Amino acid sequence: MAIKKIGVLGAGAMGSGIAQVAAQSGLQVVLVDLEQRFVDRGVQTMLKNWDKDVSKGKISAEDKARFVGNLTTSTQNIDLKDCELVIEVVVENLDVKKRVFAELNDICPPRTVLATNTSGFSITEIAAASGRPDRVVGMHFFNPVPVMRLVEVIPGTETSDETVALAMEVCQIIGKTAIKAKEAPGFIVNRLLVPYLNDACHALQEGVASAEDIDQAMKLGANMPIGPLALCDLVGNDVLLMVAEYFYKEFGDPKFRPSLALKQKVRAGHFGVKTGKGFFDYTR
Ligand code: CAA
């Protein structure tokens, strides 16, 4: 199927990043969120990124105008009705995602593929709630989406080959490398990354070193582009805690036990970059 129009449901950091790379690749993009202020914030992020690229000479002003022209926005899910693919990027909560997929099933024609950007929940469970399990697939992007090259493509147990092929094709169109992963909590990247980030929180809790020194150690000693606690803040401590709790429940293995330091950040509302505070302060 020739893909021309995709929907992105959720205009947060991940949703606006996906909408950005899709609009850049020439796809028509409908970006939807619950409230106008969320949509506006997502669009502002994209415009800021494109302005930066214009000033660096990476794109022309005409390119930017073309990208903007590929984008429409809405606060009504019904406006996703004529998309060939809808990528769900709402809050990382399984019940909310199931509700959203049931609603999308009512709105979109049977041919539309519904993808979830879940960080690790069961695609099969989300697909079962959708009423079209053969047309549901995981498409897991990484933050910041315009920079990170990978998309994990995850079929549920009933996902058709045609649906997987469409997801892989869209990744190619938008310039990402797709890697297919079998359904298992956290797929590939988060299965390995989340315990590492959670362990950095445990180390902080145990007083092994300061947050600054833990991060500096991993940058200088393991060549990480960013320290683990700064990465917690970038991913979002709220998202990370939800994923860690899900892993702990699913695997039943104490190695996934969420750190108290991580829980306390979330309890204090210090979700990281998006709230201005996390393990580090972003307000200054
Ligand atoms: N949006 C768009 N572009 C961005 C950006 C953003 N949010 N952040 C950085 N960039 C761009 C910059 O504009 C710059 O572009 P140019 O090369 O054209 O100048 C480039 O990225 C490098 O940026 P900086 O020089 O400012 O900073 P840096 O060298 O520290 O790189 C980084 C920033 C790419 C984010 C780097 O710190 C990094 O790779 N961090 C690790 C990110 C990571 O691991 N992400 C995965 C998280 S896990 C996840 O997302 C999945 C999940 O489910 C939880």
Image (cartoon, grey):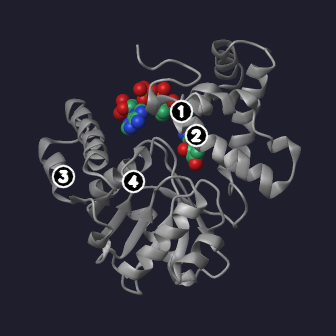
Query: For numbered disc 3, what is the local secondary structure?
Result: helix
Of the two numbered discs 2 and 4 in the rendering, the one whose residue sits closer to the viewer: 2
Percent x, y for residue 87?
43, 64
| Residue tagged 2 | 238
Of marks 2 and 3, which one's residue comes earlier in the chain? 3
Query: For numbered disc 2, what is the local secondary structure?
Result: helix
Q: Quadrant of residue 198?
A: top right
| Residue tagged 1 | 271
Q: Can residue 140 be seen here?
A: yes
| Residue tagged 3 | 68
Do labels 2 and 1 touch, CB within 8 Å?
yes
Of the two numbered discs 1 and 3 in the rendering, the one whose residue sits closer to the viewer: 1
Percent x, y for residue 170?
42, 67
Q: Is residue 11 above or below residue 274?
A: below
Do labels 3 and 4 touch, CB within 8 Å?
no
| Residue tagged 4 | 18
How far apart in space, not on screen, are marks 1 and 3 (Cα)? 30 Å
Q: Looking at the image, which is closer to me, 6 or 219?
A: 6
Q: Which residue is rendered at x = 31% and y = 47% of the image?
A: 38
Q: Is residue 240 above or below residue 160?
A: above
Quarter of the image where the N terminus is located: bottom left
How far apart in space, not on screen, are marks 2 and 4 (Cα)? 20 Å
Alpha-carbon neighbours of circle 1 within 10 Å: few (<14), some, or many (≥20)? many
